[in-house]
Every structure is written in structure tokens, then in C-alpha cells.
Image: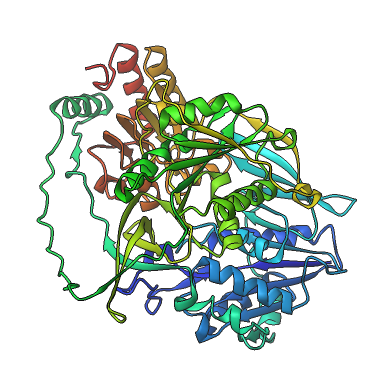
């Protein structure tokens, strides 16, 4: 038995910087093992308790300084470490990274047909990219089953693994055979620190450094890695500027006066944003450039409609908004085709037509009642190969975030993750004096949400996932009709090796957060009473007939005080209530990413220098245990934050 952990060395989030060329500038940043990867490392060490004789192997890809993190993994208790390092890999996107790592693992003797059992563990995503692609892409490249967004695993006597997977609104219990790939969220067992004996051992251990030639990467494979071989490329980087005016702080000698001041500030409306003049971009003369259309046979837009509890998930309806916008930009009667997979779901086609789909490809099968990565990725890939769309869009839900990259690896397309803007544009190739037109511009916040990157895909279909909550659901067109096409996929038992043992979804969470007019959210600084006051304020608002809900930051979920369905932020949900109240939330930029679409934002924090106050409209400095009871009493007396006005 071999336990393999994939890790990445990343700069500290507070020190991440990006160069003008879109590449990461690590020269002045201190680096650590990516946080999520640390939980994957610990999960491997926990699994060894069930397999005492298991060999522990840690693997990474990157420049030679990555050896530092591999040494740290050895000091935690791993036996062997390998680093794939080669200048030819520089600038690789996630597709190229997944391909390269899988090639290294195969060269080390780990294949789906290996006689010896093994399991590959990884972190959910890296802090410098936040794509969550590589585990899915390694799994597909190696032909292995996978499970992502996992909190914990349990080995079974029959050689299988039971995994608890976070999903919107709850969790699933999955059963997977080995070998398999599993990626972990930071909600599992906290990573241990290196022991003194482990540190001494690591100091004298050798790291197996491999080049692309060492791992027998073929010339065809080498053409698919590095910046030139990657199917996606960074086309532009721009700073993300705050679109909020300076905060208005409450003043007062006690809690009652502070709350009075806050309510008065809200009534007055707050400060006004003074916008800076945009710098004029330098134009490139392309008068004599050749116009090139790379699409060939690829035409039209494909989306996937996720079915949850017998209905279309809201993020899948939101997806039709950018799809319609892109179709209008492309013109020439560009059609939107939506794939709908499940059991007894033909009745849902009407809803998709009313929200913007021109055609629904219907796949009905009793075994497909619930989402499963292997059959769903195979079905959509078969449809893509038959229909040849130029663009394929997925919602960035837990399912969409593992499904899209697996399909991208199958089709050689690559994927742009977690997009907040999608539009059709040009790519100016000055070297070859060409203008590639039309091409999808996928825009996504990255590197701690400080930059907005524009990503282009050069292999079709161009695949992107859209951040849930970013796009408004299109206006419904009653009785709008479209074409229904039934599709019979070719599937075999290999696609059903992963079993769903149990699915638990709560009543609150995803949908209620999207629908709420006011959200009361707690962070690390509001857990002293286990969020009781946060929940009490939300309930007081509900009791007055308001559409209110409570939520939390990532730290609260990671520490077990709330389920993932309540998490707001870059790795949670993007929400857009009329009022968002942030209580004890420090203001990490990843959280701000999920709330910036809110109408008005109020922050309550006991630290006057907390970063949160740079991104909100109104603020109070004070202890939440003193402030919230005052606000709750005002709500019980009829105060509604101006929502009913």
C-alpha cells in the first residue's frame, strides 16, 4: 500500500504578487505548503494508522526552491519525496500541470492497473490560483475515480474508502475503490507540526528531482505543457479597485448611542464614491493584421443544468444570463444548448426554455438520479464530441468545480475557473500579425482577489465555470418553448464504481442565502457564543416578516461552527442582499469577494484597524456581545434597516 500526497508551495497570501506578464512573482514572498495541501498531508498520515506498513510518498511540481516544502512533508512523517522540475514546464496552466504530474506518477509505477494498492491525496485548491482543477485533472489523466471537497475519509475492510463530501446545503457519503484521487478541504484534522526526529531525518533525506525527460514524457505530451503548450493563457491583468465610498463610522459613549448613530447613518445614506478617471489604454494598429477565426466546426454554447432535490439549481439558471449575452455577441443565430441529466426530469425542460435555453439535450437514466462525476463527465464529453460547441459553461458549485476540469482534460480544452465576467473579444497576436476573432474572454479574480485576470482558451470548446451568485437569473419568459433532444450515452460499469451511500441536505443554506434581503454573517470574532447572537438577530428579522438569513466566513466553517452551505466568500458563495451585516469578520479579501455585490454593507468589529472597514458602508467599533442585543431590541421594536422603504 502506498499513500501519495500532492502538494504545492505557495507564497503567503499576504505577500502574493503578480507580474505584468500574468506570472507569479515569488522573488520577495515567503513561501509555505499550501494550506489545503497541509490537510491532505495530515489525512495521509491519519490513513497510515490503518495501514502501518504503507509507504508515504509526497510529490510536487515546480522550481527547485519547492524542495523546502517537500523537506517539511518528510519531517511530518513521509518517507519519499519527488519534485518534477523543468524549465519546459514554466507557465503551465492547470491542464498542463495535471498532465505533467500524472506522467510523473505513472513513471514512478502508479497506474490504474498497478498490482499494488495506492491512493492519491491532495488539497482542494491552492491559495495562489483557487481553481480546484488539478485533482480532477490528475484523476482523469490517470483514469481513476475521484472525490473532491472531502472533509474526512475512512478505510474499509474490503479495500474501499468511505469519504464525506461537502455539498451545497449539506454533505454526501461516498464509497470509492482504490486506486483513487481524493482532495481535502481545510475542515478535517488540523495538520501536525514536524517532530525534532522528523526534522533531523528530513535534513539528511534526498529529494528525487525529475525532469520531463526523466519521466519519459513524449514529444506529443511536451507539446502540451509549459506556457506555449497550455490550452489556456493569461491575456491581461488589472488591479481590482474598490467600488465603495469611505466608511461612515458610528460614534457614541455606550452601546445604545453607538447603535443610534449607526441607524442614523444608514438613514442618511452614507458617503458618496468619487470615481477616478480611467486611464486610456494604448491602442494597437491592426489595420494590416490577418483576421483569423479558429473555431472551425465548433459553434454554439453548451451549458449544464445541475438538478438538486428534483429542481434546477439556481446557479445553473444564473448561467443562462452570460450564455445569452455571449450568444448575442456572437450573433449568426448562436444557439444555447443545455444538458439535463437525471431520472424523471423531462418536466424540467420547460423551465430551462423559459430562462433562455434554445435546446435541451435530455439524458434520463435511473442510475443517474444523483450527480456522479464519472458518468456525468463521460456523458457531457460524448455530447461535446458530437455537437462541437465553441463554448461550454458550468456553474462553479462543488459539482461544477470538479466536473468542468475533468471534462477539460478529456477534451484537451483546459478550463477557466470561477469567472465573474464573460464576453466575446479579440486576441491580438503581434508576433504573427494576426487577430484571432471571436474568442471568449473569461475574467476571474485571482491572487487574493487583488487582480482581475483575463484568460483565453485556444482549444475548443472554451470551457469556463461561473461563480455562483455573480450573475442574476435571467428574466423568465412564460411559455417560451424550445427543442428537446433525447441522448443515449454509451456507459459501462467502470463509470459507476463510486457509490453514493447517503445524501443529507439541510433546509437552509444555498437557496435562502441567494434569496435573502438581509444577511447576518459571523466570523472568527463572533464565535465566542457559537454564533448564537448572529442567529438571534437573523431570527428577529425573520419574525418581523423579513427575508433574512445567517451566514459565516470560511474560518467559522473550517473550525466546525457552521456547515459549508453557510460560507460566503471566494471559496463559498457570492451573495447580493440589500443589507449585509459582517460581525467579527476581519475583512480578508477572499470574503470581500463574496459580498461586494451587496447593496449596503455594515461591519461590527472590536478592532478599529480591521481591514473590513475599508470595504463597507457603515461601521461600529465595539464588542458584538454588547452591540447585537441592542440591535435585536430595535428590530423587535420594528426597525428593518430600511428594507421596506
Vertical side of 284 occupied by 300: above or below: above
Model colouring:
rainbow
Give x and y (percent) for residue 284: 18, 72
Between residues 409 and 558, which one lies in front from this camera angle?
409
Q: Is residue 534 visible?
A: no
Horizontally, residue 355 falls left or right of residue 530, namely: left
Residue drawn at x 54%, y 71% as measured from the top left = 96
Vertical side of 549 occupied by 410: above or below: below
Residue drawn at x 36%, y 41% as measured from the top left = 324
Quarter of the image containing the N terminus?
bottom right
Horizontally, residue 143 falls left or right of residue 485, namely: right
Q: Is residue 343 visible?
A: yes
Task: Tell me where residue 291 sits by quadrant.
Answer: bottom left
Give x and y (percent) for residue 583: 37, 36
Between residues 481 and 273, which one lies in front from this camera angle?
481
Residue drawn at x 36%, y 52% as measured from the top left = 589
Quarter of the image containing the C terminus?
top left
Horizontally, residue 193 falls left or right of residue 600, namely: right
**Which residue is outermost to the right?**
158
Between residues 174 and 465, which one lies in front from this camera angle?
465
Task: Tell me where residue 486 sits by quadrant.
Answer: top right
Give x and y (percent) for residue 41: 66, 63
Vertical side of 336 occupied by 53: above or below: below
Give x and y (percent) for residue 200: 68, 81
Amino acid at each position: 500500500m502506498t499513500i501519495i500526497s500532492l502538494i504545492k508551495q505557495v507564497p503567503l497570501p499576504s505577500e502574493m504578487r503578480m507580474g505584468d506578464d500574468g506570472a507569479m512573482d515569488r522573488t520577495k514572498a515567503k513561501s509555505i505548503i499550501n494550506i489545503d495541501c497541509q490537510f491532505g498531508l495530515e489525512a495521509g498520515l491519519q490513513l497510515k494508522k490503518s495501514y502501518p506498513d504503507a509507504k508515504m510518498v509526497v510529490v510536487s511540481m515546480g522550481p527547485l526552491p519547492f524542495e523546502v516544502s517537500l523537506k517539511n512533508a518528510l519531517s511530518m512523517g513521509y518517507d519519499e519525496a519527488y519534485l518534477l522540475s523543468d524549465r519546459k514546464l514554466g507557465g503551465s496552466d492547470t491542464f498542463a500541470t495535471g498532465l505533467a504530474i500524472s506522467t510523473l506518477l505513472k513513471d514512478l509505477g502508479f497506474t490504474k492497473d498497478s498490482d499494488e494498492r495506492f491512493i492519491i491525496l491532495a488539497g482542494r485548491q491552492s491559495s495562489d490560483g483557487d481553481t480546484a482543477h488539478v485533482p480532477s485533472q490528475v484523476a482523469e489523466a490517470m483514469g481513476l475515480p475521484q472525490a473532491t471537497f472531502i472533509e474526512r475519509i475512512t478505510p474499509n475492510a474490503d479495500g474501499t474508502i468511505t469519504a464525506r463530501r461537502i455539498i451545497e446545503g449539506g454533505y454526501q457519503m461516498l464509497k470509492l475503490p482504490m486506486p483513487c484521487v481524493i482532495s481535502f478541504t481545510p475542515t478535517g484534522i488540523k495538520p501536525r507540526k514536524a517532530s525534532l526526529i522528523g526534522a533531523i531525518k528530513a535534513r539528511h533525506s534526498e529529494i528525487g528531482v525529475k525532469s520531463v525527460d526523466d519521466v519519459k514524457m513524449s514529444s506529443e505530451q511536451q507539446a502540451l505543457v509549459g506556457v506555449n503548450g497550455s490550452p489556456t493563457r493569461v491575456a491581461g491583468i488589472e488591479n481590482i479597485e474598490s467600488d465603495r465610498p469611505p466608511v461612515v463610522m458610528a460614534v457614541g459613549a455606550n452601546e445604545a448611542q453607538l447603535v443610534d448613530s449607526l441607524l442614523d447613518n444608514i438613514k442618511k445614506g452614507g458617503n458618496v464614491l468619487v470615481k477616478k478617471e480611467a486611464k486610456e489604454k494604448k491602442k494597437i494598429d491592426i489595420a494590416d493584421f490577418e483576421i483569423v477565426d479558429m473555431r472551425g466546426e465548433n459553434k454554439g454554447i453548451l451549458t449544464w443544468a445541475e438538478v438538486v432535490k428534483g429542481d434546477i439549481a439556481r446557479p445553473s439558471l444564473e448561467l443562462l444570463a452570460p450564455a445569452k449575452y455571449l450568444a448575442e455577441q456572437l450573433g449568426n443565430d448562436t444557439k444555447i444548448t443545455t444538458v439535463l441529466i437525471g431520472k424523471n426530469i423531462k418536466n424540467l425542460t420547460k423551465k430551462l426554455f423559459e430562462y433562455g435555453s434554445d435546446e435541451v439535450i435530455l439524458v434520463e437514466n435511473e442510475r443517474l438520479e444523483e450527480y456522479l462525476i464519472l458518468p456525468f463527465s463521460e456523458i457531457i464529453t460524448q455530447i461535446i464530441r458530437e455537437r462541437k460547441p465553441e463554448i461550454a459553461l458550468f456553474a462553479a458549485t462543488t459539482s461544477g468545480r470538479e466536473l468542468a476540469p475533468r471534462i477539460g482534460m478529456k477534451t484537451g480544452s483546459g478550463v477557466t475557473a470561477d469567472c465573474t465576467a464573460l464576453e466575446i473579444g479579440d486576441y491580438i497576436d503581434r508576433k504573427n500579425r494576426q487577430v484571432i476573432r471571436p474568442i471568449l474572454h473569461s475574467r476571474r479574480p485571482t491572487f487574493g482577489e487583488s487582480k482581475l485576470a483575463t484568460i483565453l482558451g485556444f482549444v475548443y470548446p472554451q470551457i469556463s465555470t461561473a461563480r455562483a451568485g455573480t450573475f442574476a437569473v435571467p428574466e423568465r419568459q412564460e411559455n417560451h418553448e424550445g427543442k428537446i433532444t433525447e441522448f443515449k450515452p454509451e456507459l459501462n460499469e467502470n463509470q459507476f464504481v463510486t457509490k453514493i451511500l447517503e445524501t443529507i441536505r439541510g433546509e437552509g443554506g444555498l437557496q435562502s442565502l441567494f434569496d435573502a434581503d438581509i444577511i447576518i454573517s459571523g466570523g472568527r470574532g463572533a464565535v465566542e457564543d457559537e454564533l448564537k447572537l448572529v442567529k438571534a438577530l437573523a431570527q428577529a428579522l425573520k419574525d418581523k416578516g423579513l427575508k433574512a438569513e445567517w451566514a459565516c466566513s470560511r474560518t467559522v466553517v473550517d473550525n466546525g461552527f457552521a456547515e459549508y452551505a453557510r460560507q460566503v466568500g471566494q471559496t463559498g458563495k457570492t451573495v447580493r442582499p440589500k443589507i449585509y451585516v459582517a460581525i467579527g469578520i476581519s475583512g480578508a479579501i477572499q470574503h470581500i469577494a463574496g459580498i461586494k455585490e451587496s447593496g449596503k454593507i455594515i461591519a461590527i468589529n472590536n478592532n478599529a484597524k480591521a481591514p473590513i472597514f475599508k470595504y463597507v458602508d457603515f461601521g461600529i467599533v465595539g464588542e458584538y456581545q454588547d452591540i447585537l442585543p441592542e440591535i435585536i431590541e430595535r428590530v423587535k421594536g420594528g426597525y428593518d434597516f430600511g428594507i421596506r422603504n
